[in-house]
Image (tube, rainbow, N blue to C red):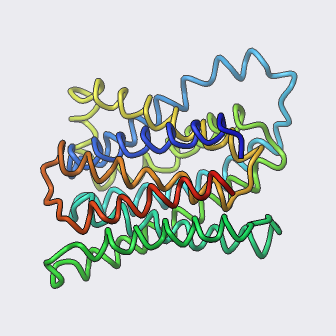
Amino acid sequence: MPLSIFLLIIVSGLLHASWNSIAKYVGKNTTILWLSMSLGGWLGIPYFVWIRADISWFSLLFWGLICAITHSCYYLVLTRAYAQFPLSVIYPISRGLGIVITSLFSLFYFRDLITSIGIIGIVLVLSGIILFHYSHQNIASLSTGIIWGLLVGITISSYLITDYLALQYLPAEHLIWVIFIFMSILLLPYLYHYHRRELYETLAQKKGIATFIGCLSFSSYFLILWVLRVSPLGYVVALRETSIIFAGILAWFYLKEPFSTTKWIAIIFISVGAIVIKLG
């Protein structure tokens, strides 16, 4: 894996951890994320007008809708999970499961080659994620959080797989705008019906933070879509999970969540795993 690709994935992980931390900070107002994503999507309309002659509209709309459905499921489960449980519970569990499912799918379906060194790196990353998870002391309250973390992880692997399939037919710079636009349309009826007060509050008072989250989220995912066109899915997904390092630090420093020695050990495992994957 070239150093430039390695660094792009790390930057994407940092951006991803940052917007997730802010999303957790805003708490139960799920409509802020919707507005941030909507802004990112609809601002792409002038781009499509400009390049309209180069677009395969059937493929773009078909794959954009499929990807948007999986992304919308992720959005619904993620916002519900962040409204109830700490970032340092949901994030490592969900990202870890996303690695496992997507890497196995990549290995058996796409026939991506994963060398023995790469496997060692993936195992180290997963070991760090497991340590990160079991560093929590309150087991009783953690059990429900585990379930929600698993659900988020399943939706993560779902959107990664559908996006990877879509990128076989479409350029990343076309796909990402359409995903965000379709998500905006698909989620609006749900939010209007169940979160109407929050929606009005967000549109009136929270546009600034929504725009900031949107910029971070859009930049993070655009980098990953671009990298997926030139790198094996298993490696990209595993290495991108170094975002758990950044999420852990942000949860400790920014969100003031408890941070034990075990969590620091987990960060070391994940960091070493990332380096090993780079060597693979």
Residue 223 pos. (x, y %): 60, 37
Specify the quadrant of the image occupied by residue 257. Answer: bottom left
In this rendering, position of residue 243 left or right of residue 175: left
In this rendering, position of residue 236 left or right of residue 12: right
Residue 203 pos. (x, y %): 29, 30
Of 249 and 21, the residue lying toward us: 249
Task: Name above or below for residue 177 compared with residue 10.
Answer: above
Which residue is pictured at 64% across the width and 70% down the height?
119
Of 109 and 179, the residue lying toward us: 109
Residue 79 pos. (x, y %): 33, 56
Task: Name above or below for residue 123 compared with residue 224.
Answer: below
- Quarter the C terminus occupies: bottom right
Disc tally is: 0
Which residue is pictured at 21% across the width and 43% down the height?
26
Which residue is pictured at 77% across the width and 44% down the height?
230
Of 254 and 123, the residue lying toward us: 123
Residue 47 pos. (x, y %): 68, 19
